[in-house]
Amino acid sequence: MELVISPYFPPFQVKNLDALQVAVEQATGQSVRDYRQALANPALFGDFMHPNKAGAGAYIDLLLKDGVLPAE
């Protein structure tokens, strides 16, 4: 199982997300991969939190490259 923080629209800031990440890591004993700034181009988002089709493809490619998702 992999725990991830998904990308957010670049100008959008989520308050207390760093503290939540630490709390989840402490509670689970697993690291949380932080992808909140992985998609820097605003054109890759449909809204402040959800990538559009192009952004989803870019995010999936990154997760595959990082080994978070299996290549098969």
Image (cartoon, helix red, strand yellow):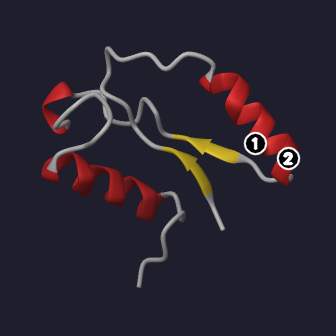
Which of the 4 quarters of the picture holds residue 46?
top left
Label 2, residues with CA under 10 Å away: few <14, some 14-19, many ≥20? few
Quarter of the image where one finds residue 38? top left
Which of the image's four quarters has the N terminus? bottom right
Q: Residue at x 32, y 35 (%)?
A: 49
Residue to which mark 2 is pinned: 27
User: Which residue has dot 1 on it?
Assistant: 24
Residue occupying the point 79% across, 53% down: 30
Residue 59 vs residue 16: left or right? left
Residue closest to the eye, 61 or 53: 53
With 59 as the anchor, is 67 left or right in this view? right
Q: Are marks 2 and 1 in contact (CB under 8 Å)?
A: yes
Q: Residue at x 66, y 24 (%)?
A: 18
* Residue 59, position as x, y percentages in the image: 33, 51
For mark 1, does the 10 Å Cα neighbourhood hold few (<14), some (14 to 19), or many (20 or more) residues? some
Compared to residue 67, the image places residue 37 above or below, namely above
- List x then y, in percent, for residue 48: 28, 28
Which residue sits at x=63%, y=19%?
A: 16
